[in-house]
Amino acid sequence: MEYLGQAIAFFTEHKFLFTLIVITVIWIIRRILIRFIWGETNFLSEDQRKWISRTKNGTFTTLLIVMFILWRSEINEFALSLTAIAVAVVVASKEIILCFTGSIQRASSRSFQIGEWIEVGSQCGEVIEHNLMATKIQEIDLHHGTYNYTGKTVTFPNSLFFTTPVKNLNFMKRYVYHEFSITIKETANLFPLIPSLLARIDDHCEDFYEVATRYNHVIERHAGVDLPGADPHIHVTTTSLGDQQVHVRLFCPTERATELEQLIREDFMTLFCERILNQRSVEIADDDLLLELQTKTDQEG
């Protein structure tokens, strides 16, 4: 007990040293917990990311509480002396205050969680971490319709939530309304091609159509609005230059959106060449192509 009393008295007199020890201990505990949660996996799951974020926020909160208790008397004296310049301090720390209140606003409104897809301004991505000051996302190429990770990590302050709308795109992680256009410069009647193109689209979507329909109903019940539905839709418009555009909208699995777009483009161009331009599509088998290349090589040799 005597040594304990001496240790308490020593650290009471040397608060700065005790502060360094507390910070070091909390930092070591945080590193150990994060490494334990991370484990041996190369890619973190949503649950792992949530627990890592909770660990970081929890240790940071614990550190703030300990620092406040330890330096309470000094903080009280500093607060009293700060009254005269309180306005200046508020103005100088406005961005920090907005970050804190933005974090409170996000938590109270439950606008998004770790693992969900969001769009803030022009930035789209999956939330991988958020704390009292900032939010970090893994960027997704949403505007170009590929829905793939770009490999870039975007960090923005929570104060942005007061000035920029936050869109929750979590439903797009599984299924998405994928839209694209095909431009035709030739003057021709494209409407007779639509039934055949829709039939081919139905063939491409047959394996997931029932699941897409059910998922579409789930989104409708959750959002409380009448969505366009899971059936593919095609309409024809013209550009300002007079070129015709065929617009296609699909409700499909997100990871297959690019693949389906390429198949549908191929189907449309095949139909257009056969029925409008009266040209038959030429298909060369791999063996025939190799034989043709070998013949040309022999002749040149």
Image (tube, rainbow, N blue to C red):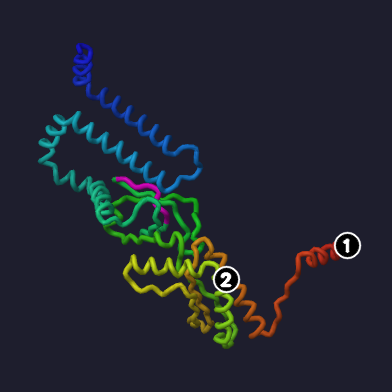
- The amino acid at mark 2 is His
Identify the secondary structure beneath mark 2.
helix
In the image, residue 156 above or below residue 81: below
Toward the viewer: 168 or 229?
229
User: Which residue is depicted at the point 58% across and 68% down?
Assistant: 262
- The location of residue 252, given as percent across then percent down, is 49, 67
Q: Can you identify the residue that label 1 sits on?
A: 298
Q: Is 64 left, or right, of 238 in this rendering?
A: left
How far apart are the two marked residues, 2 and 1, measured between alpha carbons? Answer: 42 Å
Question: In this picture, which residue range is highlighted in magenta?
Answer: 125-131
> Where on the picture, by quarter, is residue 226?
bottom left
Local crowd at mark 1 within 10 Å, few (<14), some, or many (≥20)?
few
Q: Nearer the viewer, mark 2 or mark 1?
A: 2
Left or right of 28 on screen, residue 100: left
In terms of depth relative to the viewer, which is nearer, 114 or 299? 114
Q: Mark 2 sits on what residue? A: 204
Q: Residue furthest top?
A: 2
First reached walking from the N terminus: tag 2 or tag 1: 2
Residue 115 vs 248, above or below: the answer is above
Q: Indicate left or right for 36 with 222 as reference.
A: right
- Counting from the top left corner in percent of width and height, residue 220 is at 36, 69
- The 10 Å Cα crowd at callout 2, few under 14, some 14 to 19, many 20 or more, is some
x and y percent of residue 85 in the render? Answer: 13, 42
Give the prevailing secondary structure in the magenta stretch: strand
The reply to whether the magenta stretch includes residue 127 is yes
Task: Residue at 31% x, 60% y: name it.
Answer: 164
Secondary structure beneath disc 1?
Answer: helix
Residue under the point 59% across and 81% down:
196
Residue 280 placement (x, y as % from top left): 71, 80
What is the total number of numbered labels drawn onto the structure image? 2
Q: Is residue 59 magenta?
A: no
